[in-house]
Amino acid sequence: MKEYYSNTIQMLSDLISLPSVNPANEIEYDHNVFGEKAVVDYLENYFRKHKYHFYVEKDRVMKDRYNLNIYTEKNKNKKTLLLETHTDVVKGQNMIFPAFKPFVKDGKIFGRGSCDAKGQIAAMILGTEMALAQTNYSLPVNVCLAFVVDEEHLHRGVDRIVKQKYKADGAIVGEPTGLKIGVASKGSIRFKIATKGVAVHTSTPYYGKNAIYLMSKVINIIQQKLASQIEKNTHPLCNKSTICISIIQGGEQVNIVPDNCEIHVDRRLNPGEDWQNAYNDIKIGIEKELSIEERDRVVFFQPYLIDPSLETDTDSKIVKVSMEVLKKHELQYDPVGLNFGCDASKIALLDIPVIVFGPGEIQQAHSENEFVKIDDVIKASEVYRDIIINFDK
């Protein structure tokens, strides 16, 4: 245990100290902070120098942004287990300590990405190494470790996996689930609504049309009328569907009546909800509360992100084996639902039964004092190890 404890601290410290902030859609950015390259290079070097011969593949997703696929074997006579998580993190400016200078305190390691999802990367690697050692380097299954880019923005890394039609008999996506098995999660659509106005001098606002005033009416409709209707959609594991306005922008100058305003809407979808119906219901629900003149000044943009929901059959092999392993480790083994979305719902599009599992609590992800408990990372490693060993039994 002491060896794994020190190895865990070392690997997590190395990963956290390599900033990999998602650059979103920026093409030119400071590679010392943004992009996943440094982390991918570190992991590639780690596996290429490993005493066990891993098959290492880099796959270009965008300029300077690569998925990294690691295979223990490529044996067609064995089942394949996919372990997937992401290498990007969110920005660290809001943190109460330097984001990329990890430190250990009270059995926790602090730093941006410690919980989401570099703790999962470390646990998956250590768990695979444990499984190899325990089986004398003869695993009963092929293991593919897939470390992907862009999960925190437009999930283009996992989309690449889907496009390439990966094949596996089961999958685990690493996210902070508190060492619980996630079998269901919400999906989402994100889109913009804009209002148009007529700009005039603020000394004579009655000659213009204030786009912010119209947007305030749209916001009120969403808040007072649509939200309560949307929340009536419930799921036994994922709770209520939701809608949230998360960004608002409008106006150009303090002495000009604004002729534009724009909001971003995040609609969280429970399993079974169709995104197109959800989008149309919002559009129709807003328009019916507006006058004809107002409707002409409201523009609904198509979603720039469509993230499917997840619902994995609890009778699938990956769920059953994972439940048995967690029960053995005296952890909660009843499957749970997740309020957040992740790569699992995209992998499920390949008809691969998938669960979400990992150390850390989602409340710590993206937080000002992000951390993960070191013992939880080690426990997750042991769970990954035992799932690998027992998946084909």
Image (spheres, grey):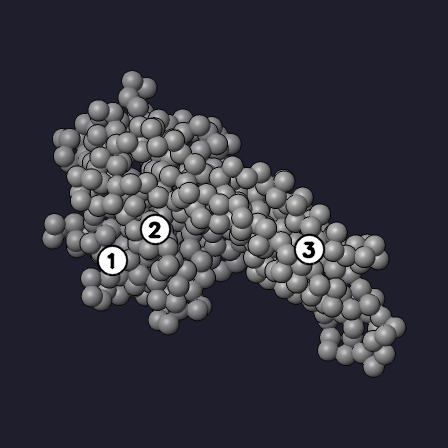
Of 121 and 270, nearer the camera is 270
The 10 Å Cα crowd at callout 2, few under 14, some 14 to 19, many 20 or more, is many
Q: Position of residue 234 (x, y in %)?
A: 49, 45
Residue at x 55%, y 39% (from the top left corner) = 273
Residue occupied by mark 1: 373
Q: CA distance from mark 2 to mark 3?
A: 32 Å
Q: Position of residue 271 (x, y in %)?
A: 49, 39
Check whether the beta carbons of the residues at disc 2 and disc 3 lie within 8 A of each other: no
Question: What amino acid does circle 2 point to?
Answer: Pro
Q: Is residue 40 visible?
A: no
Q: Earlier in the sequence, mark 2 or mark 3?
A: 2
Residue occupied by mark 2: 176
Q: Position of residue 161 (x, y in %)?
A: 46, 35
Q: Position of residue 151 (x, y in %)?
A: 46, 47
- Give the SS element for disc 3: strand
Question: What amino acid does circle 3 point to?
Answer: Ile
Residue at x 65%, y 49% (from the top left corner) = 282
Question: What amino acid does circle 1 point to?
Answer: Lys
Q: CA distance from mark 3 to mark 1?
A: 41 Å
Q: Which mark is residue 104?
A: none
Looking at the image, residue 129 lies above or below residue 3: above
Q: Earlier in the sequence, mark 1 or mark 2?
A: 2
Give the quadrant of the C terminus: top left
Q: Is residue 324 left or right of residue 278?
A: left
Residue sitting farthest toward the top: 77
Q: Which mark is residue 193?
A: 3
